[in-house]
Image: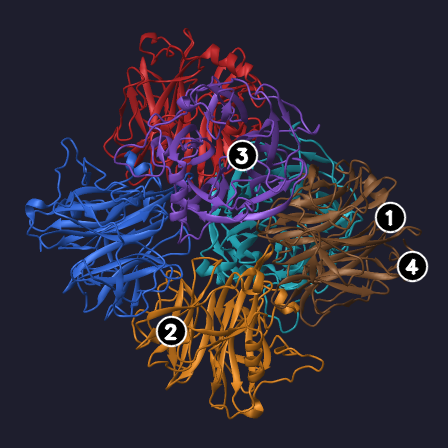
Chain colours: A cyan, B red, C purple, D brown, E blue, F orange
Amino acid sequence: MSTLEKAFPWEDRPENSKAVMWRYSQNPVIKRDAIANSNSIFNSAVVEFNNAYAGVFRCDDKCRRMNIHTGFSKDGINWEINELPIEFIAGNTEMIHSDYKYDPRVVWMEDRYWITWCNGYNGPTIGIGYTFDFKTFHQCENAFLPYNRNGVLFPRKINDKYVMLSRPSDTGHTAFGDIFISQSPDMKFWGEHRHVMSPAPFEDSAWQCMKVGAGPIPIETKDGWLMIYHGVLKSCNGYVYAMGAALLDIDKPWEVKYRSQPYLLTPETPYECMGDVPNVVFPCAALHDKETGKLAVYYGAADTVTGMAFAQIEELVDWVKENSL
Amino acid sequence: MSTLEKAFPWEDRPENSKAVMWRYSQNPVIKRDAIANSNSIFNSAVVEFNNAYAGVFRCDDKCRRMNIHTGFSKDGINWEINELPIEFIAGNTEMIHSDYKYDPRVVWMEDRYWITWCNGYNGPTIGIGYTFDFKTFHQCENAFLPYNRNGVLFPRKINDKYVMLSRPSDTGHTAFGDIFISQSPDMKFWGEHRHVMSPAPFEDSAWQCMKVGAGPIPIETKDGWLMIYHGVLKSCNGYVYAMGAALLDIDKPWEVKYRSQPYLLTPETPYECMGDVPNVVFPCAALHDKETGKLAVYYGAADTVTGMAFAQIEELVDWVKENSL
Amino acid sequence: MSTLEKAFPWEDRPENSKAVMWRYSQNPVIKRDAIANSNSIFNSAVVEFNNAYAGVFRCDDKCRRMNIHTGFSKDGINWEINELPIEFIAGNTEMIHSDYKYDPRVVWMEDRYWITWCNGYNGPTIGIGYTFDFKTFHQCENAFLPYNRNGVLFPRKINDKYVMLSRPSDTGHTAFGDIFISQSPDMKFWGEHRHVMSPAPFEDSAWQCMKVGAGPIPIETKDGWLMIYHGVLKSCNGYVYAMGAALLDIDKPWEVKYRSQPYLLTPETPYECMGDVPNVVFPCAALHDKETGKLAVYYGAADTVTGMAFAQIEELVDWVKENSL
Amino acid sequence: MSTLEKAFPWEDRPENSKAVMWRYSQNPVIKRDAIANSNSIFNSAVVEFNNAYAGVFRCDDKCRRMNIHTGFSKDGINWEINELPIEFIAGNTEMIHSDYKYDPRVVWMEDRYWITWCNGYNGPTIGIGYTFDFKTFHQCENAFLPYNRNGVLFPRKINDKYVMLSRPSDTGHTAFGDIFISQSPDMKFWGEHRHVMSPAPFEDSAWQCMKVGAGPIPIETKDGWLMIYHGVLKSCNGYVYAMGAALLDIDKPWEVKYRSQPYLLTPETPYECMGDVPNVVFPCAALHDKETGKLAVYYGAADTVTGMAFAQIEELVDWVKENSL
Amino acid sequence: MSTLEKAFPWEDRPENSKAVMWRYSQNPVIKRDAIANSNSIFNSAVVEFNNAYAGVFRCDDKCRRMNIHTGFSKDGINWEINELPIEFIAGNTEMIHSDYKYDPRVVWMEDRYWITWCNGYNGPTIGIGYTFDFKTFHQCENAFLPYNRNGVLFPRKINDKYVMLSRPSDTGHTAFGDIFISQSPDMKFWGEHRHVMSPAPFEDSAWQCMKVGAGPIPIETKDGWLMIYHGVLKSCNGYVYAMGAALLDIDKPWEVKYRSQPYLLTPETPYECMGDVPNVVFPCAALHDKETGKLAVYYGAADTVTGMAFAQIEELVDWVKENSL
Amino acid sequence: MSTLEKAFPWEDRPENSKAVMWRYSQNPVIKRDAIANSNSIFNSAVVEFNNAYAGVFRCDDKCRRMNIHTGFSKDGINWEINELPIEFIAGNTEMIHSDYKYDPRVVWMEDRYWITWCNGYNGPTIGIGYTFDFKTFHQCENAFLPYNRNGVLFPRKINDKYVMLSRPSDTGHTAFGDIFISQSPDMKFWGEHRHVMSPAPFEDSAWQCMKVGAGPIPIETKDGWLMIYHGVLKSCNGYVYAMGAALLDIDKPWEVKYRSQPYLLTPETPYECMGDVPNVVFPCAALHDKETGKLAVYYGAADTVTGMAFAQIEELVDWVKENSL
């Protein structure tokens, strides 16, 4: 799938750094006011598309309404984002009610791009849609009952079923959160729910001791599905969102084989520590180049802007295995 | 289905009373210590079975562990409850993990008795099982992701699908709660989730202003599905659970046609106001006699014992229509 | 004013009792279902009227809507309560919006009966109305901005102004509460607000350590205004409302001269400890006979029914002075 | 009133900007340590005075005690702030108790400058005072019972009465807040309270979904009273205060004719996002030049320093009308 | 020590009962108004004394102030309680400050009766005192820093040190609670703190899943120290306090050998379910007769009155071993 | 003790500043990533050692596990911090369990360096250890029962006993906190606990109105023990930690002679306002030069890095006396 080697968004690891993941030096790649009416553009999803890149971007407008917009880029770094949100037409249902949309993920599967997001239907739940061309978008049945967030599809069927990660939630600033997996024969009816992983004990890995949720589309490796995820700690001054990674069994992806005890990235820079929600690093998408093993992760920073960070897939996989909880 | 007229559990409305629903004078019908090891026996489900009655009873033991037991009765009033909880064998899945079971509902459909309950699987969700004989019980896939409670099946397929009511929740003493409906082609995969009803505005109907949840199996009437449900108010001294009723559209049961503004029953008696959880009236099952229109509702009282209350179906339906929110 | 000596509601202190206040042996005098549609009848106000007694009663209906109804009695004990709530017409304003009404107080002043209550106008505040005949009722401007409760008028002007006690609150189950006084030249515009009293320190008088609020219309005595009030304690199982008394300066009623360290009455009986809000004794009205010094206090019990308790005014005043905080 | 055209504090809209309101490039205009003993100087009020400008400034000292100080400026930008807080003498009352003073507003009316502030009298309420010369200050009766904040006078009588906006509150970090209006014949007794506006629904305008409160003195325009106000959102990491605007009916100022769905200004700069209370933009005063239509808004930033922002009145009014909720 | 066999307070197990512990049929043995000024008399301690019984009783007065009083009885059932609280003189310290005293325990050791209680010294901590004659009482240094409750001494030195159980707490209605042990060479300086036991997992033993605390003085048996304790569950309507038992290692009493999964006693009767704090069974003392093995436990009921329950020590020990968590 | 005058870490007060304490211009002196695996290095302790300086540093690793590391410096500014945490061997006990260690203090007394820290033993409590050489470390019995933080030893025995300050806490982000003192004959058993100081009233000194806790080892002066401490304010956006100072009686150190009403230092710089816990200034150690009176305070900034601030002891003592609460 990856034939765009030259255009792959990339920056080498800084000299003297030994970090397994490093930030893009020109972060944030997308500013909060990248379109005229935006308050912030952050937890967003990108994929390869037409020998370039397309994306679905969470843009909160100046009313602080949450919605998702398309965007396009030749290099994965400079993005043209549509001033208007995506309008959906009916997909596998007529019931396409949506009070708001946020935190999209996008994945190519079989013949189309599938999009999932947090959809407002009497509370937050997981919306599903698809597009063939990033012009016309179809909205399907919500996957689950409310209250749910961070629905993330696997990039292919497993055991002949569609598989989705999610994090059941409540109606507010959920103070708990485990990752579960659900399965579907048809992208409409879901079942065979399995628990994947809980927050870690405070003494062992405090950065992920309050809640955890899946990030980008999992990446298939020879050591299992690489799942980059966020973990949350609660300090006396609020939540801190950091990023880690795990390896899930290829055929039974509810089995966690390895899970990073240290974080990969935690809020450190001003654009991560200061903004609408201070102290947030929230990964939602990743591009990877199979030939070179390059990985570019897109993450929301302080719920305000979008940053990028880089890693080498093999190094990252080894690091997860060597630093497993 | 109802040929047991003589044995139908019943007591006429007290003289001078004009109430549409009235308590059984010998309440509670099941005491907290009806079996040797029980702390309490309350939110419980009964059905006609073999020319008599069978039931699935929530029995909390003296460790305050929650589980469900079978019970049998000839008159619906005097019950023999099994000292041991139900043991399930694998139904449509091998994954029959269960940390606890509570608040069962039972319904005859097609060829068997289906049981739903609140099942402990990394938090509360809706468990499903079935039995043909109340001896051997099969456990199926959980219907939904956690966190959910009060899963109640309709007594027949609608639009060729199984249909279930439920109340998405959180990990604790959920302070919110709407009723939703979900649909399934096969009792395994669920989708087409629809919102049914929210708590009522405080000014209009305060007894149901914090959360609502379905109770007994809905009863089909010419005016729609009669859904008896509980509503909750929060006072400065805790929650008060009362009982009301609504009528749902026969073919689109997510459409509420009528919904009672007054409650049917609220905690008033010592066995409802005093106990492990004071001030709880919580309906979970109902027997009805189609020929006479008699309705006997079983409800948990103070999360400690089981009470009964009676009504005439037609009167009740009329009352809902005349007292609709 | 008191010429009804024979009919004054009264029961002598039980033998062997030394209590300064004692309960009526036939409590509750008003049951929760004293009218057809009531869920509860409790915090209520009574006055002498036409050689008998009239009252304004808080009746919550079976929708748990709160409203106030008239009632009449020849002996102060047996009451005929109107099935329908009071309907108000415009008094000194056209703006008589009211989402709900509760906890009324009534007082005769100058030429009419003034009624105050907790009025729902974008939150709870103090409503004011008047009647000449307990048939036609006029609603005036709300006294204060929300959020406020327990507005209680003094029975005559002081320093040529109307004077009202109240307890500023918040939008929910207020966990704080001081008594303030406000003054008005015209029953429409209010000012000259003064602080009267705060909750007591936990170590000194725990029953009134969370909030306090005025009860019946203050009674003029030679030792000052006798203000009977409620105080609230918060246990791990909720609030406990008890009754105490204080003496306020006759001319500067914001000055507390004496205030009871012990309570007068605390929830002890089943009808006070069990009900919609367990553990509530909440005084709202008092009849007193100047010649005999008899005092009959009406109080809400468990937010469900109405009870009575008796005292001798002089004894009570002495007790407050001797047991002052 | 505005004859100081040259000295009006102003900076043109930046090129390329289309914003209806823009920040002063030299913000913050008042630093946290502008006087020797100050911890912070922020929510503050300014007016034209003696062919120059005077102001009343909230200065929290290094004990974090809150008080108000006078300050003077020739250009509205460079301020000399008095090292000592204002001392008040008795105005229309002897009762001028004040535990603390904060968030002042100032307005010229009739013959004097009226000042309102949040006054500590057994909790926060609205203090009133006046001065003729910014040297001698008179303190009047508090307008309302506690608990209240953000009392803002209209700049002239309406229907022959003084009119004040306020936001009833509770004893702490109030998590709710509607704007109300009150009226007074004499600046001493207040009544005829009317509801003005509530927080907006989260789905429509999340930046103002938790509480709203009036800011500068309303400005009379041909389209109604221009009320600049703050709105608050609660994220998982605390409150975010932003600024919006509404138009109120000239004669019935409790009627909202237009209200901005988007915010005007939200915390974006380091001095707004970082400080004693991160993420606060809180307007308290505005200067406007009738001839040129220039508007200079003074706002507290991060509860630490004072910033300025500019707009053209007509543009702003049009923007409110075109972007109304 | 036990030579009073005839007078031992006792009632045989009811016929048909198989319970290991059963209530006294004449409960409550001490009413809330057993002395003139008491609001309630509950968590209280008794011991053998002078061929009869003496006790230290928690009496809350009608100000709801908490204090401890002596009492005496010939049969352990009918008690004469002193109208006045105990006055302490200096013991091993001059610092005998005490804002309040509650929940006493008493034990004979070596040459005197030691008393421990919850002592108010800038928050609740463990007070220590002693008496030789129940007339003169000496107060010693508080054992620990605040915040602590339920300090319970062992009846003899272990490893040559005094040993005390306690439950570290916070400043309010502590929502957590583990039992710890501390050791002292001299009853003045304490150290060598060890963790004894935590609340149990909800799934295993919900009645003790929120907090646990020691009750009566531990009783030495051949199977270890028998520690009767309370456990707490939190329902949506508040806390439920029940009673259980554990066996601790004789020489290393911080090692739990057995711990009851079921409760021994849970609130079931009106005097346990209704009162100042509904749903409380709280054991503080036990008498045991070594020869007959009879055990009489005194427990507070609903924080209002005192109840008794009986068991046979050997049966109880066996039951703990057979029903261990 | 101080013979290293030239190497004393110092920077003169900036010109134009009149502050009694001023920041080091090159702050932070220790960055968050000063060792390879650290997430943050902050609340840390330093002492003179071998003609240079040694320290014990709180280093949270990238798992956000808390531990303490040694470090060494010739100038007190440039530190070599050990990559590995300190490993303790048994001191006066075999029980050296530790789930985590944080916020160390170090003091030379008699013949060795004593270290105290917050030690994880079934919750946070005060750990004690010692070293002679900063190579071998011995762990002793925990001083107190959980839950406790900020244990700080005095630098010599007082009245022949070891004396320690501490702040009893709860299991989470403790929202209260007083400073207490405890005494020990042997560093093993502790008693004679005395209250030292509470948070200040909000109206008088809001920066220290929620909790207070001791910081560096108290410094003996002719005016008493100089105790530098932290105080906490709760804003609607979280806690703010600032620094103040008090003077305690030399012989009765539980008696506060003077206590600063203003703070010494409050979060103002980006490295104090932004980081893992925004708005934290938390002093844990101080070096002082007796001959010159120079004082260098080390403090944690934003729970992320370590800063330094300077003062002249005599000036500081005078300032406390002149600005006393």
Residue B65: image x %, image y %? 33, 39
Chain letter of disc 1 in the image: D
In the figure, A87 relative to C208: above or below? above
- Of the two numbered discs 2 and 1 in the rendering, the one whose residue sits closer to the viewer: 1
Please, what is the three-letter code of the amino acid marked with disc 1?
Ile
Q: Which residue is mark 2?
A: F128
Q: Which residue is mark 3?
A: A190
Which one is nearer the viewer's eye here, A275 or D109? D109
In the picture, measured across the screen, residue A313 lies left or right of residue B115, that is: right
- Name the quadrant containing residue F12: bottom right
Find the distance from the CA under tag 3 to the CA under tag 2.
55 Å
In the picture, measured across the screen, residue A147 lies left or right of residue C267, that is: right
Find the distance from the CA under tag 1 to the CA under tag 3.
55 Å
Q: Which mark is residue D4?
A: 4
Labels 4 and 3 in the same subunit: no
- Name the quadrant containing residue A311: bottom right
Residues at circles 1 and 3 in contact by the CB criterion of under 8 Å: no
Please, what is the three-letter code of the amino acid marked with disc 4?
Leu
In the figure, F134 relative to F128: above or below? below
Residue F2: image x %, image y %? 50, 90
Q: Which residue is mark 1?
A: D313
